[in-house]
Amino acid sequence: MKIKNLFSLTLPVILGLTLCFPGAPAGKIEIPTDLLKKPWEAAWICLPDRDRTSYGVFLFRKTFELKEKPSRFIIHVSADNRYKLYVNGVEVCDGPARGDLWHWRFETVDIAGHLNPGKNLLAAVVWNFGEYLPWAQMTYSTAFVVQGNGPGEAVVNTGESWKAAENKAYSPIPIDRSKIRAFTVVGPGDRVDGGLFPWGWEKPELDDSGWQDAVKVSRATPREIRDADSHWHLVPRMIPPMEKKALPAPMVRRAFRIAVKKNDFQQGAKLLIPAGKKVTLMFDQDHLTSAYPELTVSGGKGARITLTYAEALFDKEGNKGHRAQIEGREIIGNMDEFFPDGGPGRKFTTLWFRTFRYLQMDIQTTQEPLTIESLSLTFVGYPFQEKASFTSDDPLLARIWEVSWRTARLCAGETYFDCPYYEQLNYAGDTRIQALISLYVSGDDRLMRKAISLFDDSRISDGLTYSRYPSYVPQIIPPYSLFWIAMVYDYWMHRDDPEFVRAMLPGMRDVLEWFERHLTEKDLLGRLPWWNFVDWAPEYEDGVCPGAEDGETSVISLQYVYVLNYAAELCAGFGKTQEAEHYRELASRIKAAVLKHCWSADRGLVAETPEKKQFSQHANVMAILVDLVSPGEQSDLCEKIISGKDLIQCTFYYRFYLNRALRKVGRGDEYLDMLSPWYKMLEMGLTTFAENPEPTRSDCHAWSASPIYELLATVAGIEPSAPGFKRVQIEPHLGRLNKIDAAMPHPTGTIACSLERQGEEGVSGSITLPEDLSGVFIWGKKKISLKPGKQEIKVK
């Protein structure tokens, strides 16, 4: 695998990371140069005499003395697979942020706020899911490391002074794909035997004298040092800690064999389950969420509690139907199990979060009654803040905004996720859309930077990126390597960060050269290896367009041209004029080949293949985006795309590119009329937007959140018109709306517009730009120069 030097790119990000856990002092952390250039004093540690690649949950403790409470106490922490770190019984961080072995992240935290004079305890739970590993989790073997920031913190460096034990209460519940009836790779459920659980293991009062001494695995080493004896090449975390916040307890929608009011748990009521009783409670969170459940119980020794999580319920035919309906429907989903030991106030939570709207609790007591003390939820996700806004005279668009944003949030954690319930994988095709949403709604570019870097890290010797990364199961989707380049271009246009973009150019070149090597004698792409996914259109077998694997394809050929144009702009912007000219010439050759071999004069459309037997929206959308036909002909082509019901239709994913084509030919006012599939999802009771039209696997899929971006970029018309977003173009497409108010974050402030139609042709209102930003306002054929500050707009 080809690996790039991104160490210098990650460092500035972590140095600017503000601490955000309870009790942390305000400020930013400087990582000593020695910890980034030399072997650490700390060692990776594990439990002695234990297979380090199989499933297991392990506990580590370090007791140490302090003469006084420190003002700062900075440590650096990591583990394989995952960890949660506690200081004197309080959880302070978790991780590591997902990456690969060549870029293994460590967290940097200041724990001073949790320390006391005298005895203190640092404790961690580390788990390895072994053969049940989530596909998104890279691994070598079980290990844990803590490194103090300097001499004062060296007392907690991991080594043989740490105590270790296995938490034998845990065993895995493998996901049963045949039962769930869908591809699912998020890792196992937790089965926890309360009788074996070492309650209080994370608290100073516990006597750990019977625990074993930890053993050293290897010395911890940062990336790029000579002769590293560690398999984990440590680099700083690129992103902030995940947001965690308490959610209201879910309501009870139905109960079997016990009387419960729907708001009992929300009001803090306790529930007594008599001995020898079997009961079922169905909880409804009202909307989809990702959260850690925490169940607190007392008594009930020998009882069995099963928690099942689902996005939706299913009828007898296996259909979801309206998502809020529960009558005649059953739950099928991922599960956890907890076996109480009879003690008071026992708290069960999961190692990894769960995604669900519905949670079913099945309880079977034996000889003792069980008291359910509480059920609470802690939301978890990337800490995006909603800084953009959009209002209009159509109240339904507010609902589109809300559900789009919830979809985007649930599809963002330590990486972007295609879907939070089934995969949690960072796919380039999905991520390009997600990243634009992040920039427009939150202004936070850190997860986008990480995504771009991850795909660059994933490049194989052939030149292509993985389709999804991190993923321990390799997968190559050649078109997704192209859309990774499009993501680099998007970042270049929206952020003034030339050194980061420049570092991506070698990888971009490798991808483009791979495609150039696969051109046929006709200058078309075809017979491509791996999985050439384009869209989930029913006519595309497994998402693959005709000709991609057994002939020649216009769709992927034009996708290549689309990205060659971006590459030419990028190269020209960085002074690589010869490369830019090569990409332009290559794009022209391929366009000419598509016209010669795939254009149907009879239909005035681009066919899928030179045989001209099938036609799609996809090929013709790309034809518009790359100017395959003249601007004067593009409007007619677009009309055929929209009205041609016999064409293979774009699904939710590819409608993002369909809308780009609409705007390009001056039909952006039709965007709002294209939202009917999203309105149908709302009518079906979805609280996030789905992967596909019904029937759909995933009820929450990142690429379907695109309307929130379009409301700002298409309807309000706000887009960068120069690299680094140094100029702005505002070209609204109000469609059927009479009035809008929109605002979005810009690197230097906020862009805001308030517009109202005047008669059939006019518009008036105001535009506010941040300091040092100028641009242009476009309404029809009228152009008005924009300057920093607030200005009135009036076009008759």
Image (cartoon, rainbow, N blue to C red):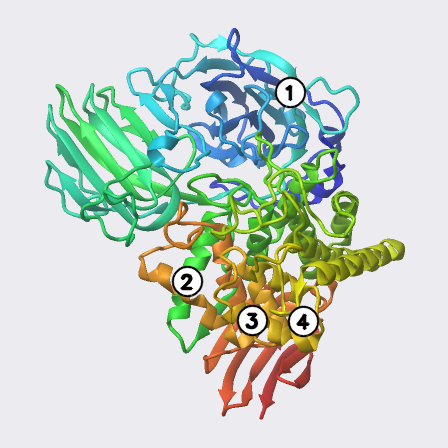
Q: Looking at the picture, how far across and down is residue 453, in whole percent?
A: 67, 43
Which residue is label 3 attached to?
A: 640
Q: Looking at the picture, how far across and down is residue 39, in whole percent?
A: 73, 22
Check if mark 4's residue and mark 1's residue have beta carbons within 8 Å. no
Check if mark 4's residue and mark 2's residue have beta carbons within 8 Å. no
Q: Quadrant of residue 774?
A: bottom right
Circle number at residue 690 = none
Task: Compute the Cα span from label 4 to label 1.
Answer: 50 Å
Q: Looking at the picture, how far across and down is residue 461, in whole percent?
A: 75, 33
The kind of residue on which mark 2 rests is: Pro
The kind of residue on which mark 3 rests is: Lys
Which residue is label 2 attached to?
A: 677
Q: Earlier in the sequence, mark 4 or mark 2?
A: 2
Badge 1, how many Cα within 10 Å: few under 14, some, many 20+? Answer: many
The kind of residue on which mark 4 rests is: Val
Q: Quadrant of residue 178?
A: top left
Circle number at residue 728 = 4
Q: Earlier in the sequence, mark 4 or mark 3?
A: 3
Q: Is residue 334 visible?
A: no
Check if mark 1's residue and mark 2's residue have beta carbons within 8 Å. no
Q: Nearer the viewer, mark 4 or mark 2?
A: 2
Q: Nearer the viewer, mark 4 or mark 1?
A: 4
Secondary structure under the numbered disc 1 in the rendered image: loop
Q: Nearer the viewer, mark 1 or mark 2?
A: 2
Check if mark 4's residue and mark 3's residue have beta carbons within 8 Å. no
Q: Is residue 543 visible?
A: yes
Which residue is label 1 attached to?
A: 42
Q: What residue is drawn where x is 56% and y is 66%? A: 659
Q: Earlier in the sequence, mark 1 or mark 2?
A: 1
Q: What residue is drawn where x is 41% and y is 28%? A: 188
Q: Nearer the viewer, mark 1 or mark 3?
A: 3
